[in-house]
Image (tube, grey):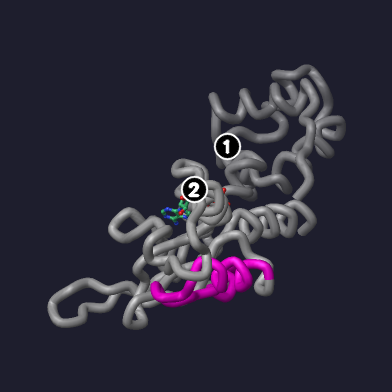
Amino acid sequence: MSTIEFSKRQKKIMEIVQQSEPITSEKIASMLEVTRATLRPDLAILTMSGILDARPKVGYFYSGKSQFNLFSEEVKRIKVETMMSLPIVVTEETSVYDAIVTLFLEDVGTIFVASKGYLSGVISRKDFLKSAIGGTDMNKVPVGMVMTRRPNILTIGLKDSVLDAAIKILDHEVDSLPVVEREIVEGKEQLKIIGRISKSNVTKLFVELCKA
Ligand code: ADP
């Protein structure tokens, strides 16, 4: 969706319709002191871009949907499950060294950590750098000692919108979120790791929507 730069007259039309809806094209034309024919292309643009709504025999309504509103409505409709990537998961016992190898082989920036099949933590590039600087024996120390641990893990659900995921990613300054499904196991809430949604997924969606 490309952004339209509206002309002065188009902006004036928006104002008039906003104040006097429903209003016919004759009335708009007389207020602007132009002919209906002059207005036709402007009204067509405003209707096609969803800002005005035309109802036969009634006139024009202001629907208030700017390009940005339409864009964000589209983003809100897209669910995490349609955009997510495969999660890369290691167990807590995995050595920091092996996890770094996995990070390179799988070409990801964040690895999720599982214990007994459920999410227990997240380990990112910065965590690995921190442990390297700290002189950790990478072959001996398990990721469980270096990772960010639950309950301090931000997650997202399959049915949540990509916009919610993007807001969480931005607000908390992380690169990715585990996509999870909640399960109650022996009275305790556990998180099954289903996918991964990252800044790259969001950027890709942004580009696709702009091109569409
Ligand atoms: P990087 O370290 O590559 O810049 P992040 O910005 O995602 O990647 O990670 C910064 C810190 O936040 C790390 O300590 C990491 O463990 C933690 N972190 C990453 N993702 C999450 C998440 N979804 N929830 C909670 N903490 C996270």
Q: Position of residue 31 (x, y in %)?
A: 70, 19
Occupied quadrant, residue 118 = bottom left
The amino acid type of the residue labelled 1 equals Tyr
Indicate left or right for 51 with 9 as reference. Answer: left
Occupied quadrant, residue 46 = top right
Asked if the magenta segment contains residue 102, the reply would be: yes
Asked if the magenta segment contains residue 156, the reply would be: no
The amino acid type of the residue labelled 2 equals Gly
The label on residue 134 is 2
| Mark nearer the N terminus (1 vs 2) | 1
Q: Position of residue 106 (x, y in %)?
A: 65, 73
For mark 2, give the secondary structure. Answer: loop
Relative to 158, residue 174 above or below: above
Q: Residue at x 81, y 38 (%)?
A: 40
Verify CB contact (< 8 Å) between mark 1 and mark 2.
Answer: no
For mark 1, give the secondary structure. Answer: strand
Q: Position of residue 77 (x, y in %)?
A: 53, 61
Indicate left or right for 85 with 7 as reference. Answer: left
Q: Is residue 133 visible?
A: yes
Q: Which residues are magenta?
A: 83-104
Tag 1: Cα neighbours inside 10 Å, few (<14), some, or many (≥20)? many
The answer to which of 43 and 192 lies nearer the viewer is 192
Q: Residue at x 34, y 59 (%)?
A: 149
Residue bearing mark 1: 62
Indicate left or right for 31 with 72 as reference. Answer: right
| Residue that sits furthest to the left in the current view | 187
Q: Position of residue 197 (x, y in %)?
A: 54, 63
Indicate left or right for 9 with 161 as reference. Answer: right
